[in-house]
Amino acid sequence: MVNLFDAPGREEVRQRILELSISVWAFAAVSFALEAGVLDELSTPSTAGQISQRTGIPADLVSSILEVLVALGFGSADEHGFVASPGLAAVTRGPTKELLAADLRSTRLQTAELVGRAARGTIALDGWNYSDPDLLEAQGVRSAEMVVPWVERLFPNLEGLSERLRKPTARFLDVGSGVGRLTIEMCRRFPNLQVVGIDPFETSLTLARRNVAEAGLADRIELRPQRVQDLTDDRCYDLAWVPVMFLPADVAARGLHRVRTALRPGGWAVLGSLAVEGSEIQPAILRLVSLLYGSGRLSPEHAATMLTAAGFENVLALPAMPGVPQRTIVGRRPVDE
Protein backbone atom coordinates (compact mmCIF):
# COMPACT_ATOMS: atom_id res chain seq x y z
CA MET A 1 0.00 0.00 0.00
CA VAL A 2 1.29 3.44 -0.91
CA ASN A 3 1.68 5.76 2.07
CA LEU A 4 0.40 9.10 0.79
CA PHE A 5 1.87 10.88 3.79
CA ASP A 6 5.34 9.91 2.54
CA ALA A 7 4.70 10.89 -1.08
CA PRO A 8 7.71 12.66 -2.66
CA GLY A 9 7.39 16.45 -2.48
CA ARG A 10 4.47 16.36 -0.04
CA GLU A 11 6.21 18.49 2.57
CA GLU A 12 7.29 21.04 -0.04
CA VAL A 13 3.72 21.37 -1.31
CA ARG A 14 2.34 21.76 2.20
CA GLN A 15 4.95 24.41 2.95
CA ARG A 16 4.08 26.32 -0.23
CA ILE A 17 0.36 26.16 0.61
CA LEU A 18 1.16 27.46 4.09
CA GLU A 19 3.10 30.37 2.55
CA LEU A 20 0.17 31.16 0.27
CA SER A 21 -2.23 31.07 3.21
CA ILE A 22 0.01 33.44 5.15
CA SER A 23 0.06 35.78 2.14
CA VAL A 24 -3.75 35.77 1.99
CA TRP A 25 -3.96 36.64 5.70
CA ALA A 26 -1.34 39.37 5.27
CA PHE A 27 -3.39 40.86 2.43
CA ALA A 28 -6.50 40.69 4.63
CA ALA A 29 -4.66 42.41 7.51
CA VAL A 30 -3.59 45.31 5.28
CA SER A 31 -7.11 45.58 3.85
CA PHE A 32 -8.56 45.60 7.37
CA ALA A 33 -6.12 48.28 8.51
CA LEU A 34 -7.16 50.49 5.63
CA GLU A 35 -10.92 49.86 5.75
CA ALA A 36 -11.12 50.16 9.57
CA GLY A 37 -9.14 53.40 9.71
CA VAL A 38 -6.06 52.00 11.45
CA LEU A 39 -3.75 53.35 8.76
CA ASP A 40 -5.20 56.82 9.28
CA GLU A 41 -3.82 56.77 12.83
CA LEU A 42 -0.21 56.09 11.89
CA SER A 43 1.07 59.47 10.72
CA THR A 44 2.61 59.95 14.17
CA PRO A 45 3.78 57.26 16.62
CA SER A 46 0.77 55.67 18.34
CA THR A 47 0.35 52.71 20.65
CA ALA A 48 -2.22 50.00 20.12
CA GLY A 49 -4.14 51.34 23.11
CA GLN A 50 -4.25 54.86 21.72
CA ILE A 51 -5.43 53.64 18.32
CA SER A 52 -8.02 51.46 20.05
CA GLN A 53 -9.41 54.44 21.94
CA ARG A 54 -9.66 56.54 18.77
CA THR A 55 -11.14 53.84 16.53
CA GLY A 56 -13.11 51.60 18.90
CA ILE A 57 -11.24 48.52 17.66
CA PRO A 58 -10.15 46.11 20.45
CA ALA A 59 -6.57 46.88 21.48
CA ASP A 60 -5.44 43.26 21.09
CA LEU A 61 -6.69 43.22 17.50
CA VAL A 62 -4.97 46.54 16.75
CA SER A 63 -1.74 45.19 18.24
CA SER A 64 -1.87 42.05 16.10
CA ILE A 65 -2.59 44.03 12.93
CA LEU A 66 0.34 46.35 13.69
CA GLU A 67 2.63 43.35 14.16
CA VAL A 68 1.69 42.16 10.67
CA LEU A 69 2.43 45.61 9.22
CA VAL A 70 5.85 45.64 10.90
CA ALA A 71 6.61 42.15 9.56
CA LEU A 72 5.70 43.37 6.06
CA GLY A 73 8.11 46.30 6.37
CA PHE A 74 5.28 48.83 6.37
CA GLY A 75 6.32 50.44 9.65
CA SER A 76 8.29 50.14 12.86
CA ALA A 77 7.57 50.05 16.56
CA ASP A 78 9.45 51.30 19.64
CA GLU A 79 8.62 52.49 23.15
CA HIS A 80 6.67 55.42 21.69
CA GLY A 81 4.42 53.21 19.61
CA PHE A 82 4.03 52.27 15.95
CA VAL A 83 4.65 54.60 13.03
CA ALA A 84 4.15 53.96 9.32
CA SER A 85 7.10 53.77 6.96
CA PRO A 86 7.55 56.76 4.62
CA GLY A 87 6.39 54.60 1.71
CA LEU A 88 3.20 53.49 3.44
CA ALA A 89 2.49 57.00 4.68
CA ALA A 90 2.82 58.30 1.11
CA VAL A 91 0.11 55.97 -0.24
CA THR A 92 -2.35 56.32 2.65
CA ARG A 93 -3.18 60.01 2.38
CA GLY A 94 -4.85 62.14 -0.25
CA PRO A 95 -5.84 60.69 -3.62
CA THR A 96 -3.35 57.82 -3.33
CA LYS A 97 -5.28 56.44 -0.37
CA GLU A 98 -8.41 56.12 -2.52
CA LEU A 99 -6.38 54.31 -5.19
CA LEU A 100 -4.86 51.91 -2.65
CA ALA A 101 -8.29 51.18 -1.16
CA ALA A 102 -9.72 50.52 -4.62
CA ASP A 103 -6.84 48.23 -5.54
CA LEU A 104 -7.23 46.13 -2.40
CA ARG A 105 -11.03 46.07 -2.61
CA SER A 106 -11.16 45.15 -6.29
CA THR A 107 -8.65 42.32 -5.86
CA ARG A 108 -10.46 40.99 -2.80
CA LEU A 109 -13.88 41.01 -4.47
CA GLN A 110 -12.71 39.55 -7.78
CA THR A 111 -10.80 36.68 -6.19
CA ALA A 112 -13.72 35.92 -3.85
CA GLU A 113 -16.02 35.83 -6.87
CA LEU A 114 -13.70 33.40 -8.68
CA VAL A 115 -13.66 30.98 -5.76
CA GLY A 116 -17.39 31.48 -5.19
CA ARG A 117 -18.13 30.45 -8.76
CA ALA A 118 -16.29 27.18 -8.18
CA ALA A 119 -18.22 26.56 -4.96
CA ARG A 120 -21.55 27.28 -6.71
CA GLY A 121 -20.67 25.25 -9.78
CA THR A 122 -21.27 28.26 -12.04
CA ILE A 123 -17.94 28.26 -13.82
CA ALA A 124 -17.98 29.92 -17.24
CA LEU A 125 -15.50 31.94 -19.27
CA ASP A 126 -17.87 34.76 -20.13
CA GLY A 127 -15.42 37.62 -19.74
CA TRP A 128 -15.85 40.72 -17.61
CA ASN A 129 -19.42 40.40 -16.43
CA TYR A 130 -19.60 41.73 -12.87
CA SER A 131 -22.60 43.51 -11.38
CA ASP A 132 -21.45 44.18 -7.79
CA PRO A 133 -21.47 48.00 -7.49
CA ASP A 134 -18.63 47.95 -4.94
CA LEU A 135 -16.44 45.93 -7.30
CA LEU A 136 -17.31 48.08 -10.30
CA GLU A 137 -16.58 51.30 -8.41
CA ALA A 138 -13.27 49.94 -7.11
CA GLN A 139 -12.24 48.87 -10.61
CA GLY A 140 -13.24 52.29 -11.92
CA VAL A 141 -11.03 54.09 -9.41
CA ARG A 142 -8.17 51.78 -10.35
CA SER A 143 -8.60 52.64 -14.02
CA ALA A 144 -8.42 56.39 -13.28
CA GLU A 145 -4.95 55.85 -11.81
CA MET A 146 -3.59 55.55 -15.34
CA VAL A 147 -4.37 59.15 -16.23
CA VAL A 148 -1.45 60.63 -14.26
CA PRO A 149 1.29 58.58 -16.01
CA TRP A 150 -0.49 59.15 -19.31
CA VAL A 151 -0.43 62.92 -18.93
CA GLU A 152 3.05 63.16 -17.43
CA ARG A 153 4.94 60.49 -19.38
CA LEU A 154 2.98 59.00 -22.27
CA PHE A 155 1.12 61.82 -24.03
CA PRO A 156 4.17 64.13 -24.36
CA ASN A 157 5.87 61.34 -26.35
CA LEU A 158 2.96 60.84 -28.76
CA GLU A 159 3.42 63.41 -31.49
CA GLY A 160 0.90 66.22 -31.33
CA LEU A 161 -1.40 64.57 -28.78
CA SER A 162 -0.91 66.84 -25.75
CA GLU A 163 -1.50 69.90 -27.93
CA ARG A 164 -4.65 68.37 -29.46
CA LEU A 165 -6.12 67.52 -26.06
CA ARG A 166 -5.82 71.15 -24.92
CA LYS A 167 -7.63 72.61 -27.93
CA PRO A 168 -11.31 73.67 -27.77
CA THR A 169 -12.04 70.90 -30.30
CA ALA A 170 -10.47 68.10 -28.22
CA ARG A 171 -12.41 64.82 -28.14
CA PHE A 172 -11.71 61.51 -26.41
CA LEU A 173 -13.26 58.07 -26.93
CA ASP A 174 -13.34 55.83 -23.85
CA VAL A 175 -14.05 52.23 -24.88
CA GLY A 176 -15.44 50.19 -22.00
CA SER A 177 -15.99 53.29 -19.90
CA GLY A 178 -17.28 51.33 -16.89
CA VAL A 179 -18.41 53.62 -14.07
CA GLY A 180 -16.83 56.66 -15.74
CA ARG A 181 -13.95 57.33 -13.35
CA LEU A 182 -11.24 57.44 -16.04
CA THR A 183 -13.37 59.71 -18.23
CA ILE A 184 -14.02 62.09 -15.33
CA GLU A 185 -10.31 62.30 -14.52
CA MET A 186 -9.46 63.01 -18.16
CA CYS A 187 -11.96 65.88 -18.18
CA ARG A 188 -10.40 67.31 -15.04
CA ARG A 189 -6.95 67.20 -16.62
CA PHE A 190 -8.09 68.71 -19.94
CA PRO A 191 -10.71 71.46 -19.41
CA ASN A 192 -11.70 71.65 -23.10
CA LEU A 193 -12.12 67.91 -23.57
CA GLN A 194 -15.41 66.42 -24.77
CA VAL A 195 -15.78 62.67 -24.21
CA VAL A 196 -17.85 59.78 -25.50
CA GLY A 197 -17.81 56.70 -23.28
CA ILE A 198 -19.20 53.42 -24.58
CA ASP A 199 -19.99 50.32 -22.53
CA PRO A 200 -22.33 47.38 -23.16
CA PHE A 201 -23.33 46.86 -19.50
CA GLU A 202 -26.25 48.85 -18.13
CA THR A 203 -25.20 48.37 -14.49
CA SER A 204 -21.91 50.14 -15.19
CA LEU A 205 -23.58 52.86 -17.23
CA THR A 206 -26.09 53.56 -14.45
CA LEU A 207 -23.24 54.09 -11.99
CA ALA A 208 -21.35 56.13 -14.59
CA ARG A 209 -24.28 58.48 -15.17
CA ARG A 210 -24.49 59.11 -11.43
CA ASN A 211 -20.74 59.71 -11.12
CA VAL A 212 -20.67 62.05 -14.11
CA ALA A 213 -23.61 64.05 -12.75
CA GLU A 214 -22.02 64.32 -9.30
CA ALA A 215 -18.80 65.55 -10.95
CA GLY A 216 -20.77 68.25 -12.79
CA LEU A 217 -19.61 66.95 -16.18
CA ALA A 218 -22.86 65.87 -17.83
CA ASP A 219 -22.42 68.57 -20.49
CA ARG A 220 -19.00 67.21 -21.49
CA ILE A 221 -19.43 63.43 -21.22
CA GLU A 222 -21.80 61.39 -23.39
CA LEU A 223 -22.38 57.79 -22.28
CA ARG A 224 -23.63 55.20 -24.77
CA PRO A 225 -24.74 51.56 -24.40
CA GLN A 226 -22.55 50.32 -27.24
CA ARG A 227 -19.88 47.77 -28.14
CA VAL A 228 -16.68 48.82 -29.85
CA GLN A 229 -17.32 46.58 -32.88
CA ASP A 230 -20.59 48.47 -33.45
CA LEU A 231 -18.98 51.92 -33.40
CA THR A 232 -19.98 54.05 -36.42
CA ASP A 233 -18.30 57.39 -35.61
CA ASP A 234 -16.09 58.86 -38.35
CA ARG A 235 -13.14 61.25 -37.81
CA CYS A 236 -14.38 62.42 -34.43
CA TYR A 237 -11.66 61.84 -31.84
CA ASP A 238 -8.06 62.81 -31.09
CA LEU A 239 -7.52 59.95 -28.64
CA ALA A 240 -9.14 56.57 -28.04
CA TRP A 241 -8.56 54.31 -25.04
CA VAL A 242 -9.15 50.62 -25.81
CA PRO A 243 -8.54 48.16 -22.94
CA VAL A 244 -8.13 45.06 -25.09
CA MET A 245 -7.68 42.86 -22.00
CA PHE A 246 -11.50 42.87 -21.82
CA LEU A 247 -12.01 41.91 -25.49
CA PRO A 248 -11.74 38.55 -27.25
CA ALA A 249 -9.07 38.73 -29.94
CA ASP A 250 -11.54 38.62 -32.84
CA VAL A 251 -13.67 41.37 -31.28
CA ALA A 252 -10.58 43.48 -30.61
CA ALA A 253 -9.44 43.10 -34.22
CA ARG A 254 -12.79 44.24 -35.60
CA GLY A 255 -13.11 46.97 -33.02
CA LEU A 256 -9.72 48.47 -33.82
CA HIS A 257 -10.77 48.97 -37.44
CA ARG A 258 -13.80 50.89 -36.14
CA VAL A 259 -11.63 52.90 -33.76
CA ARG A 260 -9.26 53.86 -36.57
CA THR A 261 -12.22 55.19 -38.57
CA ALA A 262 -13.49 57.06 -35.51
CA LEU A 263 -10.16 58.83 -34.95
CA ARG A 264 -9.25 62.03 -36.70
CA PRO A 265 -6.21 61.77 -38.98
CA GLY A 266 -3.17 61.93 -36.72
CA GLY A 267 -5.18 60.78 -33.70
CA TRP A 268 -3.81 58.16 -31.33
CA ALA A 269 -5.15 54.87 -29.96
CA VAL A 270 -3.86 53.71 -26.57
CA LEU A 271 -4.41 50.05 -25.72
CA GLY A 272 -4.07 48.14 -22.44
CA SER A 273 -3.11 44.46 -22.26
CA LEU A 274 -2.32 42.12 -19.36
CA ALA A 275 -1.12 38.77 -20.70
CA VAL A 276 2.68 38.47 -20.80
CA GLU A 277 5.12 35.61 -21.20
CA GLY A 278 7.12 34.14 -18.35
CA SER A 279 7.03 31.22 -15.93
CA GLU A 280 7.16 33.34 -12.75
CA ILE A 281 4.10 33.80 -10.58
CA GLN A 282 3.29 37.37 -11.70
CA PRO A 283 3.08 36.60 -15.44
CA ALA A 284 1.12 33.43 -14.68
CA ILE A 285 -1.42 35.37 -12.58
CA LEU A 286 -1.71 38.11 -15.22
CA ARG A 287 -2.48 35.49 -17.87
CA LEU A 288 -5.15 34.02 -15.58
CA VAL A 289 -6.71 37.46 -15.05
CA SER A 290 -6.55 38.17 -18.78
CA LEU A 291 -8.37 34.90 -19.46
CA LEU A 292 -11.08 35.75 -16.91
CA TYR A 293 -11.46 39.28 -18.30
CA GLY A 294 -12.17 37.89 -21.76
CA SER A 295 -9.07 38.37 -23.92
CA GLY A 296 -7.45 34.99 -23.32
CA ARG A 297 -3.70 35.21 -23.86
CA LEU A 298 -3.84 38.34 -25.99
CA SER A 299 -0.34 39.71 -25.46
CA PRO A 300 0.95 43.26 -26.02
CA GLU A 301 2.79 42.01 -29.09
CA HIS A 302 -0.42 40.51 -30.48
CA ALA A 303 -2.27 43.75 -29.79
CA ALA A 304 0.46 45.67 -31.64
CA THR A 305 0.08 43.34 -34.61
CA MET A 306 -3.67 43.98 -34.68
CA LEU A 307 -3.10 47.74 -34.62
CA THR A 308 -0.81 47.44 -37.63
CA ALA A 309 -3.33 45.22 -39.44
CA ALA A 310 -6.02 47.85 -38.77
CA GLY A 311 -3.93 50.49 -40.57
CA PHE A 312 -2.27 52.27 -37.66
CA GLU A 313 1.24 53.73 -37.87
CA ASN A 314 3.93 54.35 -35.24
CA VAL A 315 2.79 51.20 -33.45
CA LEU A 316 4.74 50.41 -30.30
CA ALA A 317 4.32 48.08 -27.31
CA LEU A 318 5.81 50.01 -24.40
CA PRO A 319 7.75 48.52 -21.47
CA ALA A 320 5.85 47.87 -18.27
CA MET A 321 5.87 50.59 -15.62
CA PRO A 322 6.84 49.65 -12.04
CA GLY A 323 3.82 48.68 -9.97
CA VAL A 324 1.45 48.74 -12.97
CA PRO A 325 0.33 45.28 -14.17
CA GLN A 326 -0.95 46.26 -17.61
CA ARG A 327 1.18 46.93 -20.66
CA THR A 328 0.48 49.89 -22.94
CA ILE A 329 0.41 49.71 -26.73
CA VAL A 330 0.03 52.78 -28.94
CA GLY A 331 -0.70 53.46 -32.60
CA ARG A 332 -1.57 56.48 -34.73
CA ARG A 333 -4.03 56.96 -37.57
CA PRO A 334 -2.01 58.27 -40.51
CA VAL A 335 -1.97 62.07 -40.72
CA ASP A 336 -2.39 62.24 -44.50
CA GLU A 337 -5.67 60.36 -44.78
Image (cartoon, rainbow, N blue to C red):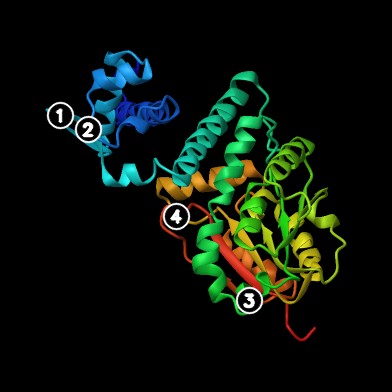
Quarter occupied by residue 303: bottom right
The three-letter amino acid code for the residue at tag 3 is Glu
Left or right position of 73 against 306: left
The three-letter amino acid code for the residue at tag 1 is His
Which residue, as the protein is rendered here, is positioned at the far right? 232
Rendering coords of residue 25 (x, y %) = 37, 26
Q: Residues within 10 Å of mark 2 (few under 14, many from 20)?
A: some
Rendering coords of residue 133 (x, y %) = 66, 31
Q: Residues within 10 Å of mark 3 (few under 14, many from 20)?
A: few
The residue under label 3 is: 163
SS under mark 2: loop
The residue under label 4 is: 278
Q: Nearer the viewer, mark 4 or mark 1?
A: 1
The residue under label 1 is: 80
Question: In the image, what residue occupies the spot 49% across and 68% down?
Answer: 153
The correct choice, above or below, for 263 with respect to 198 in the image is below
Q: Nearer the viewer, mark 4 or mark 3?
A: 3
The residue under label 2 is: 45
Alpha-carbon distance for marks 1 and 3? 52 Å
Alpha-carbon distance for marks 4 and 3? 38 Å
The correct choice, above or below, for 124 with respect to 180 in the image is above
Alpha-carbon distance for marks 4 and 2? 42 Å
Asked whether the beta carbons under mark 4 and mark 2 sit within 8 Å of each other, the answer is no
The three-letter amino acid code for the residue at tag 2 is Pro
Disc 3 or 2, which lies upstream in sequence? 2
The three-letter amino acid code for the residue at tag 4 is Gly
Q: Residues within 10 Å of mark 4 (few under 14, many from 20)?
A: few
Disc 4 or 2, which lies upstream in sequence? 2
Quarter occupied by residue 77: top left
Left or right position of 65 against 233: left
SS under mark 1: loop
